[in-house]
Image (cartoon, grey):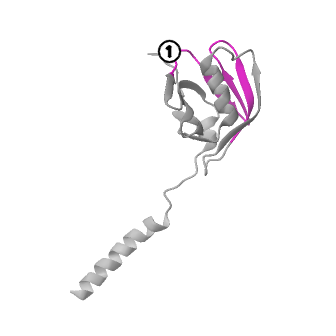
């Protein structure tokens, strides 16, 4: 009986060892997530307030540049960087063409891009996160509010 228990324990260890040595963490593919996709804003969470948008706001990431287009025609451009292992995200050299003043969603997008710390997402949805209570969420298709 003891011999059978040893064999079972050895078998369990042999089967479990590859799982123990394999990490569940994997690095995100930054190119697949960010580049080559037009991301459409679905909502912004700012503290306890969540704003859904029926207007069209989008962002594109090309090489190390980004361009966000507001529904009123203003554009926010700059440089971006992301790390797939740590999920860190940041923007720099941010410029606004046109005006975001008076458009609360555009103003908040500018603020989040300026203060972004990390991202979360896949190839179908993306969050750019300032802190635990402030982020904007995008999807990679636009359905005109339907």
Q: Nearer the viewer, residue 43 or 4?
A: 43
Give the image location of residue 33, x and y in percent: 59, 38
Give the image location of residue 97, x and y in percent: 76, 18
Residue that protrudes farthest toward the left in the picture: 1
- Figure check: 77 above or below 2: above
| Magenta region, residue range | 52-81
Residue that protrudes farthest toward the front in the picture: 48
Res. 103 in view? yes
46 lies left or right of 16:
right
Q: Is residue 69 magenta?
A: yes
Res. 59 in view? no
- Figure check: 20 above or below 6: above
Q: Main secondary structure of the magenta part?
A: strand
**Which secondary structure, mark 1?**
loop
Q: How many marks?
A: 1
Q: In the rendered image, which quarter is residue 106 located in?
A: top right
- Identity of the residue drawn at 51% across and 15% down: 54
Give the image location of residue 11, x and y in percent: 33, 75
115 lies left or right of 16:
right
- Identity of the residue drawn at 55% across and 15% down: 55
Q: Nearer the viewer, residue 36 or 65?
A: 65
49 lies left or right of 38:
left
- Figure check: 29 above or below 107: below
Badge 1 crowding class, 10 Å Cα cut-off, few under 14, some 14 to 19, many 20 or more, is: few
Residue that protrudes farthest toward the top in the picture: 72
Give the image location of residue 116, x and y in percent: 65, 37
Q: Is residue 53 magenta?
A: yes
The residue where tag 1 is placed is 144
The quarter of the image holding the C terminus is top left
- Identity of the residue drawn at 71% across and 20% down: 75
The quarter of the image holding the N terminus is bottom left
């Amino acid at each position: 009986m003891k011999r059978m228990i040893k064999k079972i324990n050895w078998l369990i260890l042999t089967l479990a060892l590859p799982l123990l040595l394999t990490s569940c963490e994997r690095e995100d593919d930054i190119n697949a997530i960010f580049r080559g996709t037009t991301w459409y804003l679905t909502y912004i969470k700012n503290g306890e307030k969540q704003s859904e948008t029926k207007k069209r706001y989008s962002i594109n990431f090309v090489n190390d540049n980004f361009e966000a287009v507001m529904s009123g025609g203003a554009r926010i451009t700059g440089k971006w960087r992301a790390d797939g292992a740590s999920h860190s995200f940041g923007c720099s050299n941010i410029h606004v063409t046109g005006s975001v003043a008076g458009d609360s969603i555009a103003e908040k997008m500018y603020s989040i891009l300026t203060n972004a710390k990390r991202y979360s997402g896949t190839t179908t949805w993306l969050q750019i996160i300032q802190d635990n209570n402030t982020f904007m969420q995008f999807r990679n298709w636009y359905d005109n509010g339907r």
